[in-house]
Amino acid sequence: MKKVVILGVLLILTISLKAQLVDPVKWKTTSNNQESGIVEITFDASIGMHWHLYSQYFDDGGPVKTTFYFDESNKFELIGTPSESPEPEQVFDDVFKINVKYFSNKAQFIQKIKLLTEEAFEITGSIEYQVCQDDKCVYFNPDFKVKVAGEKTAQVSKDAQADIKDEKHSKLEKSPQTANLVNDSIQIDQNTTEGKSIWGFFFLAFVLGLAAILTPCVFPMIPMTVSFFMQGQSSKFNSVVKALIFGISIVVLYTSVGLIVSLTSAGADFTTGLSTHWIPNTIFFVLFLAFAASFFGMFEIILPSGLANKADKQVDKGGFLASFFMAFTLVIVSFSCTGPIVGALLVKAAGGDVLEPLIGMFAFGLAFALPFTLLAIFPRMLKSMPKSGGWMNAVKVVLGFVILAFSLKFITNIDQTYHLGIITREVFLSIWIVIFVLLGIYFLGKLKFSHDSEVPFITVPRLVLAMASFVFALYLVPGIFGADLNAVSALIPPKSAQQFDLTSHQVSVSEHSSVAPNSLCEAPKYGDILHLPHGLQGYFDYEQGMACAKKLNKPVLLDFKGHACANCKEMENKVWSNPEVLKRLQEDYIIIAMYVDDRTKLPESEWITSSYDGKVKKTIGKKYADFQIEKYNINSQPYYVLIDTDGNNLNDPQGHNLDIDNFVNFLDEGVHAFIK
């Protein structure tokens, strides 16, 4: 019973981790014909740093052993069981209370077969194994196939077929702790997603959908959504129906994204392109301005009268269209932050796996829609309460200010992605300061809009909110002169967009480093349009950066980032700004920053054709988005990878994590691995 429970927990953790974890074991399968119709099938395993792969042979009752399953065929028969080399390490496992054996770095397994045909053929099967490191274990079961050159041998006999089946069953008996797992799924096509994996992805995507609500791109959408459903509802029933349609639309839209990417091979950078292209960003900037103007009382967003009157017996068609449009707006806008979260699912879709991304996107959309749907229903209940008074219009006006401030995000996305240099950091912050000063004046009753009621006196809540608005505006003022403003760094342009910076000398790397900030091998390509934060120097072209790393014999930090990546800005402002981090970045590493959403066109000689979607990549962003997916099978940003001068990983890559000590240890670990 204990073993079953442990395996169950292991599988749940494995399923969750696999959604975002690349298999740390790389397999190479080859065949080599020997004399007398004997062939050796060799499985070479390259094991990631700090991971270990379990042997085939140790006592039962422990972790999952490495096991090779060969699909039955009348063209060969197995000879014995696979050999393995080098000699595995043996340790006592405190969890399972037995001695276990495992390999580190690399392992080789050789299975001998006897040919029963003179024709060339292909052997297929699967490998079941578990890899572990200090804090996690992951279960994998990939397929394999290998071509074999046939030789003339004796005719296939019934006895040979029986031997094949006996060999298959004997291998299952060698791994009793996994026999139930195999038997339960033996009838499932190996090319389809296993049931246990689907439920794991569903659970993980659901949790991530709830977490996505708290991202800086999504959270400001909540007041706009609430305000929308506060307007023009004819009945409580109609309000609830519209809110449900809104929630269902979100689920359908997210699920459709997975389907579209799967069927059209749009690629895992689909959402990145959508959230950074100038057309959708311009549309949503104008749309948010219209919402803000409506909340200020300039005009009312009303439904067509012919449709709005159809209530009670059927769902108001106008409400359906308006609710769907609101859901569509929310889904598209949220891609700037939620795109990285669902990126792993879209990578699978781009690779041809349809079912798993659909299930994951459905679960993500379901969790993402749930809070919005509840909030969409709740305002109707507030509006139906007696003595609601004029405070509701005040709420709308306040939300108008918030939406107006948030609308600038779309313009800055365009400005940063296309290097226009129009909306500098100072301009952005100046507009925000004006907005929040006006909001404070509004709370004091000194600024009124057309539908506002008289404010005979200032209540304590209004006074507190006014003070908060003025304090926030004052907090933003130093940012005009170059202050970091860590609290809002994810929402505002980066300091590289700052033209007037009085604090530049305060964050100079040279103060924390014995290495001159300009100690690069040569001027970086694209250095005139792309920049690193805090005075750091580095490269923006992979080949150029790697050449310098080899020349200086230094490890490399690959920094996958984006102009529209809120979490990237937050990491740079809250973690990279730390003196200990800055010192290590400048002294110990060659930094190669790869912007996955930059739209600068490459020379034709540098265009690449993707091996995962077959498309030609013509811009800096598409080139490095493709590089990240092909090399690391992930497209989330920020994503930090420490490599040596040959491109080998020095430790496990990291993503968004605001723990400064963790990042310092991450950098130190890479240096120590490089020296060894």
Image: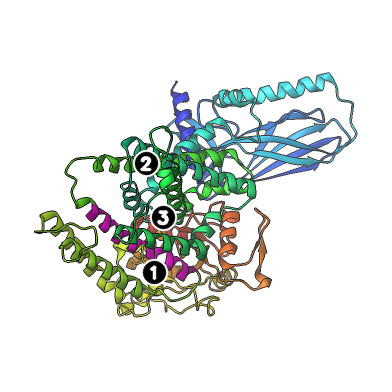
Closer to us: 82 or 358: 358
Q: Position of residue 379 (x, y in %)?
A: 28, 43
The answer to whether residue 109 shows anywhere in this view is yes
Q: Position of residue 13 (x, y in %)?
A: 46, 37
Q: Is residue 119 left or right of residue 271?
A: right
Q: Quadrant of the N terminus?
A: top left
Task: Give the CA separation, mark 2 to mark 1.
Answer: 34 Å
Find disc 1 in the rendering and name its residue: 494
What's the coloring here? rainbow
Q: Residue at 45%, 57% (x, y): give it.
A: 336
Task: Give the CA separation, mark 1 to mark 3.
Answer: 17 Å
Closer to us: 153 or 396: 396
Q: Is residue 154 left or right of residue 460?
A: right
Q: Is residue 617 magenta?
A: no
Segment tinted magenta in the rendering: 393-417
Q: Nearer the viewer, mark 2 or mark 3?
A: 2
Amino acid identity at mark 3? His
Amino acid identity at mark 1? Pro
Q: Position of residue 142 (x, y in %)?
A: 62, 38
Is residue 430 positioned above or below 31 on the image? below
Crowding at label 2, few (<14), some or many (≥20) Cα neighbours within 10 Å? Answer: many
* Tag 1 near tag 3, CB within 8 Å: no
Reading the chain from its start, which is encountered first: label 1 or label 3?
1
